[in-house]
Image (cartoon, rainbow, N blue to C red):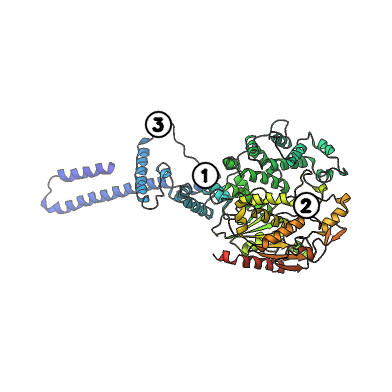
């Protein structure tokens, strides 16, 4: 304003001045022009300088403050005043209209380019560097499944974001996206928020007491004998009364031995273990899972999980319960809200194969986007545990034997050198589960499944004294679980050790009699037997001869050479196998096995391991190590790998 006034005054002076004498007119005109031009330049320079400095001050940001805000772990949510009549001023209104216009332009152009700017971007104000995050969030909520999966994959591959951007995704994504990120191998753990705070314990209460109350709230009718057994133990009044009821260490004729061994450690932890084992059994019943969720079981189990970080056995039982609950799709939202996905995402990255495999089962049961199968208790996928673009063309199933387990049976052969060097050696050279590490790398197109079931040598050591499961009963149970896991939909190779081979034979015979199981038979390509007692075991004879000491279990009794069930199974399977087009490979030990410190026994002799079809290969190892290669280039593993590749050659090529 001052500059304009000055210019007007100067112009008036020039216009109203009287005509000077002609001799000085020229120089006066020049001086007037110089004064006018100089004043204009000087005033304009001062004005521009002032405006530039004011603009610079207005747009300059404190970058340190910005970076500090970005690094915060919480997320700011833009709040809007509820007072609609509040006057935001002309500048705010102008900015709002300008943003509306820009969004309309972006929305119009975006319709041509895959329509990325949709509903959220018509109302949310975002910065340029945030567009990628919000676009991925929008894609993850698309109606098209392929688009959703691509978005999750892109999120999992993002390793250059700031902390607040990961937290933004964590807060804004839906459960499907969260589960997908948990099942993506490269996902950053910052995608997962901490679980919600757990409710406080009631006054004069303990975790053990609340666990008992949860168990007592579950239906107690129409239960099998083992559920009733564990429930009755866990609901005893106190640890001391529980010990008295069991009878102590030398309670011959009862089952005091296994309990007394565990009771000597920590009484409260032992009672918690009985509670958890009972709840594991209850969680196999869908309606009981509903009760567990309704009575706060998800939060209570999470509290126990955090309290027992140094007790893998407690954590495994808890994960078994959550995995069983995840079989019920209507409980998925409750499981996600309680924070279990974040906990399992971290467990998936554990170096302990057993912990990672339990977590993988839970997340696979939750992931209905890419997994159609359901993995029931005791069925564990060793590969692939994450989402993968690798097409799976065949299944390889591992069935352990007497006193075995889904993981420890298939570890590398133990030796003093291996134990000493294990912390320094690479995974390829020493492994606690060779099917997961060696076989998965050599044959990535395979789905590798390991099965677990309870077995015992003696009724003294039975976890449930009422449990008398024959080979026929177990085979039907396992067959049902494996079919639910999709076994039979692809070509299959069975790999079994000891009594596990008898279960495989019985499962195939049972499947051949059921039309709904015909796919299992039609897709079976081959079987590997590691020291399977097709004609009986010396262990059974030895156990029967000293039965007053061992009290042999039903499984052991069925392995005796004069067992009618074993002879019938062998004859029926031979007749069945001759009509089928699958390959068979038999391994057998040649060295005796030490059972304890005093018993030395050749568990499966060569003549008993001879099925009657397929190659029979003796190996200079004992019964326990027949399925545990010394190293990756050992004959046992290489011959097994060769059999799998040759048997599945056509299927893997297609």
The quarter of the displayed image where residue 89 is located: top left
| 239 left or right of 572 in image | right
Quarter of the image that includes the N terminus: top left
Residue 511 visible in rendering: yes
Residue located 67% across and 56% down the image: 508
Depth order, front residue of 431/587: 587
* Residue 453 pos. (x, y %): 72, 51
Of circles 3 and 2, which is in front?
Answer: 2
Pointer 1 with pointer 3, Cβ within 8 A: no
**Disc 1 secondary structure class:** loop
Q: Earlier in the sequence, mark 2 or mark 1?
A: 1
Q: Which residue is mark 3?
A: 84
Disc 2 from disc 1: Cα separation: 48 Å
Q: Position of residue 218 (x, y in %)?
A: 68, 35
Mark 1 neighbour density, 10 Å: few (under 14) some (14–19) many (20 or more): some
Q: Secondary structure at mark 2?
A: helix
Mark 2: few, some, or many residues within 10 Å (few <14, many ≥20)?
some
Q: Which mark is residue 555?
A: 2
Marker disc for residue 174: 1
Q: Position of residue 173 (x, y in %)?
A: 51, 45
- Per the model, the C-alpha gap separating discs 3 and 2 is 77 Å
Q: Residues within 10 Å of mark 3 (few under 14, many from 20)?
A: few
Rendered-image quadrant of the C terminus:
bottom right
The reply to whether discs 2 and 1 touch (Cβ–Cβ < 8 Å) is no
- Viewer-nearest residue: 19 or 397: 397
Classify mark 3: helix, strand or loop.
loop
Q: Quadrant for residue 525, please give it.
A: bottom right
């Amino acid at each position: 304003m001052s500059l304009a006034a000055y210019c007007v005054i100067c112009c008036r002076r020039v216009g109203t001045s009287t005509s000077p004498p002609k001799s000085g007119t020229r120089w006066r005109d020049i001086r007037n022009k110089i004064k006018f031009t100089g004043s204009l330049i000087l005033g304009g320079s001062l004005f521009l300088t002032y405006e530039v400095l004011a603009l610079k001050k207005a747009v300059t940001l404190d970058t340190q403050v910005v970076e500090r805000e970005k690094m915060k772990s919480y997320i700011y949510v833009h709040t809007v005043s509820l007072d609609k009549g509040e006057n935001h001023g002309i500048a705010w209104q102008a900015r709002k209209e300008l943003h509306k216009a820009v969004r309309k332009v972006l929305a119009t152009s975006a319709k041509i380019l895959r329509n990325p700017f949709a509903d959220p971007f018509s109302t949310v104000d975002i910065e340029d560097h945030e567009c990628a995050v919000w676009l991925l969030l929008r894609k993850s909520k698309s109606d098209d499944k392929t688009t959703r999966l691509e978005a999750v994959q892109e999120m999992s591959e993002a390793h250059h974001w700031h902390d607040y951007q990961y937290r933004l995704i964590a807060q804004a994504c839906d459960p499907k996206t969260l589960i997908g990120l948990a099942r993506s191998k490269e996902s950053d753990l910052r995608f997962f928020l901490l679980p919600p705070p757990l409710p406080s314990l009631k006054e004069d209460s303990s975790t053990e007491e609340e666990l008992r109350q949860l168990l007592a709230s579950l239906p107690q009718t129409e239960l099998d004998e083992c559920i009733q057994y564990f429930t009755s133990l866990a609901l005893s009044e106190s640890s001391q009364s529980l010990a008295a009821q069991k009878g102590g260490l030398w309670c011959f004729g009862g089952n005091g031995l296994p309990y007394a061994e565990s009771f000597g450690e920590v009484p409260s932890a032992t009672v918690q273990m009985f509670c958890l084992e009972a709840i594991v059994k209850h969680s196999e019943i869908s309606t009981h899972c509903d009760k567990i969720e309704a009575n706060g079981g998800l939060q209570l189990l999470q509290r126990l999980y955090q309290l027992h970080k140094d007790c893998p056995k407690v954590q495994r039982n808890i994960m078994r319960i959550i995995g069983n609950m995840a079989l019920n799709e209507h409980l998925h939202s409750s499981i996600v809200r309680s924070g279990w996905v974040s906990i399992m995402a971290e467990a998936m990255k554990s170096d302990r194969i057993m912990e990672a495999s339990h977590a993988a089962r839970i997340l696979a049961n939750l992931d209905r986007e890419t997994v159609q199968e359901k993995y029931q208790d005791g069925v564990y996928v060793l590969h692939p545990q994450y989402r993968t673009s690798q097409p799976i063309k065949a299944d390889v199933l591992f069935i352990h034997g007497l006193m075995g387990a889904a993981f420890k049976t298939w570890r590398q052969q133990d030796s003093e050198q291996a134990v000493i060097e294990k912390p320094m050696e690479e995974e390829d050279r020493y492994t606690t589960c060779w099917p997961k590490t060696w076989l998965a790398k050599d044959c990535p197109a395979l789905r590798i499944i390991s099965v677990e079931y309870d077995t015992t040598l003696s009724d003294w050591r039975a976890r449930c004294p009422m449990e008398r499961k024959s080979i026929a009963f177990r085979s039907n149970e396992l067959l049902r679980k494996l079919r639910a896991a999709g076994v039979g939909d692809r070509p299959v190779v069975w790999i079994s050790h000891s009594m596990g081979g008898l279960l495989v034979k019985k499962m195939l015979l049972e499947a051949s009699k059921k039309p709904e199981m015909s796919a299992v038979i039609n897709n079976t390509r081959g079987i590997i037997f590691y020291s399977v007692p097709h004609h009986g075991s010396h262990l059974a004879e030895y156990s029967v001869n000293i039965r007053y000491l061992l009290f042999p279990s039903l499984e052991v009794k069925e392995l005796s050479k004069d067992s009618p069930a074993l002879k019938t199974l062998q004859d029926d399977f031979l007749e069945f196998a001759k009509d089928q087009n699958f390959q068979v490979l038999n391994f057998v030990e040649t060295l005796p096995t030490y059972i304890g410190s005093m018993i030395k026994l050749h568990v499966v002799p060569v003549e008993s391991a001879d099925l009657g079809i397929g190659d029979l290969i003796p190996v200079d190892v004992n019964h326990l190590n027949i399925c545990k290669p010394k190293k990756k280039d050992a004959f046992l593993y290489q011959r097994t790998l060769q059999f799998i590749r040759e048997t599945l050659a056509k299927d893997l090529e297609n």
